[in-house]
Amino acid sequence: MELPFGVLLWGIRVAFLLLIYLFLIRAFGVLHGALAGERDPSRSLGVLVVERSPSRTPRAGERITLRATNAIGRDSGNDIPLPDEAASARHAVLELRDGEWWIEDLGSTNGTLVNGVRIAKPERVRAGDQLGIGRVTMRLERV
């Protein structure tokens, strides 16, 4: 029993389309997993625990999940927005470099404090250190 050429060609086209759809489903699954993993708190690099805050956000006791680079300031476009008038719009940057946390003040008016001391240059920060941005105090914790 021989298959006509048209039926065979049609079968090859259907098989090819199925392979394309399987590839796309797999590719979107991997992409979704990568994006979901970026927001997964269990995969965070560290946490800032708010110890003191004059406003309702962030609240004392709130845990803020950190990424490799975190812009901190009053502007809502920051990774960690602090709606405090004592904080500058772009106040500081907290980033992970070679497995260590560093904080840098971005020329803010009121300065950035590490354990109560105003910093003038990028400063290494360890787990348990307190960061003062405006009137907000946060403690760095490793996960």
Image: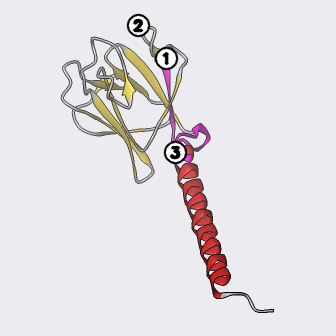
Q: Earlier in the sequence, mark 1 or mark 3?
A: 3
Residue at 61% over, 82% down: 9
Q: Give the range drawn in magenta.
A: 37-50
28 relative to 68 in the view: left or right: right
How far is mark 1 from mark 3, CA to CA?
26 Å
The CA distance from mark 3 to mark 2 is: 30 Å
Which numbered tag is attached to residue 142? Answer: none
Which residue position is annotated with label 3?
38
Mark 3 residue element: helix
Can you say which quadrant of the picture contains the N terminus? Answer: bottom right
Please tell me whether mark 3 or mark 2 is closer to you in this view: 3
How far across and down, in percent of the image, does residue 74 sit? 30, 20
Q: Is residue 19 above or below residue 132?
A: below
Q: Position of residue 111 (x, y in %)?
A: 24, 23
Q: Which amino acid does label 3 sit on?
A: Glu
Within 10 Å of disc 3 (Cα), the crowding (few <14, some 14-19, many 20+) is few
Residue, disc 2: 54
Contact, mark 3 vs mark 2 (Cβ under 8 Å): no
Type of residue at label 2? Pro
Q: For mark 1, give the secondary structure.
A: strand
**Where residue 46 sits in the image (x, y, percent)?**
51, 38
Q: Which amino acid does label 1 sit on?
A: Glu
Answer yes or no: do the residues labelled 2 and 1 have beta carbons within 8 Å?
no
Residue at (28, 18) in percent of width and height: 87
- Closer to viewer: mark 2 or mark 1: 2
What residue is pinned by disc 1?
51
